[in-house]
Amino acid sequence: MALANVLLLSQIAGHVLLFILSLCIVLPLSINVHQFCGHCLLFTTGKWREEDGMFDVNWASYGFCSFPLVTGVLLFIISVVQIYRYVRMKDEESFIALFVDVVLGIWMLAMSILSAIFITLGFIVWCDSMTERFPSCETSAGQNIIRGDTDKINTSSFYIEMGTTQFGAWGAFAISVGIGVIALLKLIHNHQVRNIKVSMYLERQRLVNQEQFEGRSSPPLTSGAASDSDQNK
């Protein structure tokens, strides 16, 4: 029970951290998409025009931003549900519930690492274009670099927003690994306890059957045998 309590507390703490990190993914990325007028910064490329020094942007697919956003929202929902479930838990979890936790842990791990890779590589592609003109990607934040029908694009805080999103995604991946390992340990522990209970039950049944067999194999003394025994004495 002590091990189970420690693992349960670890799961609660892990999902609390995952709750916070999911907000670090969703909020800054949503703000960035809004400031870029619905365009996705990730994997966006372009060329610098020589005549006016502006960036002729070639916007990437919005799916590169929608996938991390969906992942962050789902991680948020799962973490809230799991925290509520674990806090109110009184009875021992069933094998099916533990198995579902393991599957959820693997799913969160896969989704979070894919989102982290999309965000990191996509931001590198954008920064490579920015460093063609500016000494660093951070320096280009807030500069008037895009003109035309996208004049309303606000680039003032994209570097902080994407940095926070990267932190949230990689942090969610690390926490998901821990949550998945804890869920797997609980599943293994439950399986071992079940095997011990089954082994104890089978051993008890074997001892009971053995006692019954030995009781039947030694017949009771007859009256004649008892009198002969008394005479010999």
Image (tube, rainbow, N blue to C red):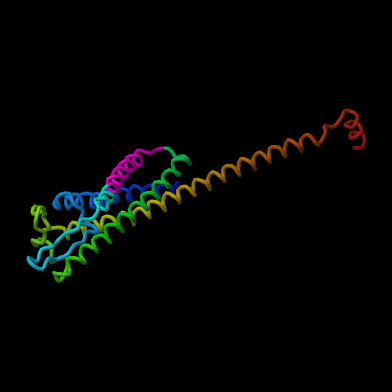
**53 sits to left or right of 128:** left
Residue 84 is drawn in which quadrant?
Answer: top left
Give the image location of residue 14, x and y in percent: 33, 51
Give the farthest residue toward the bottom: 135
Residue drawn at x 49%, y 49% is: 188
Residue drawn at x 64%, y 40% is: 204
Q: Main secondary structure of the magenta part?
A: helix
Give the farthest residue toward the front: 51
Seen from the viewer's position, the closer of residues 70 and 21 is 70
**121 sits to left or right of 200:** left
Give the image location of residue 150, x and y in percent: 11, 53
The answer to whether residue 168 is magenta is no
Residue drawn at x 27%, y 45% is: 73
**112 sits to left or right of 154:** right
- Of the 4 image quadrants, the one containing the C terminus is top right
Would you place residue 51 above or below residue 233 in this image?
A: below
Seen from the viewer's position, the closer of residues 149 and 119 is 149
Seen from the viewer's position, the closer of residues 152 and 54 is 54
Residue drawn at x 11%, y 55% is: 154
Range drawn in magenta: 70-90
Give the image location of residue 174, x and y in percent: 34, 57
Q: How many marks?
A: 0
Seen from the viewer's position, the closer of residues 88 and 171 is 171
Give the farthest residue toward the top: 223
Give the image location of residue 106, x and y in percent: 40, 50
The answer to whether residue 88 is magenta is yes
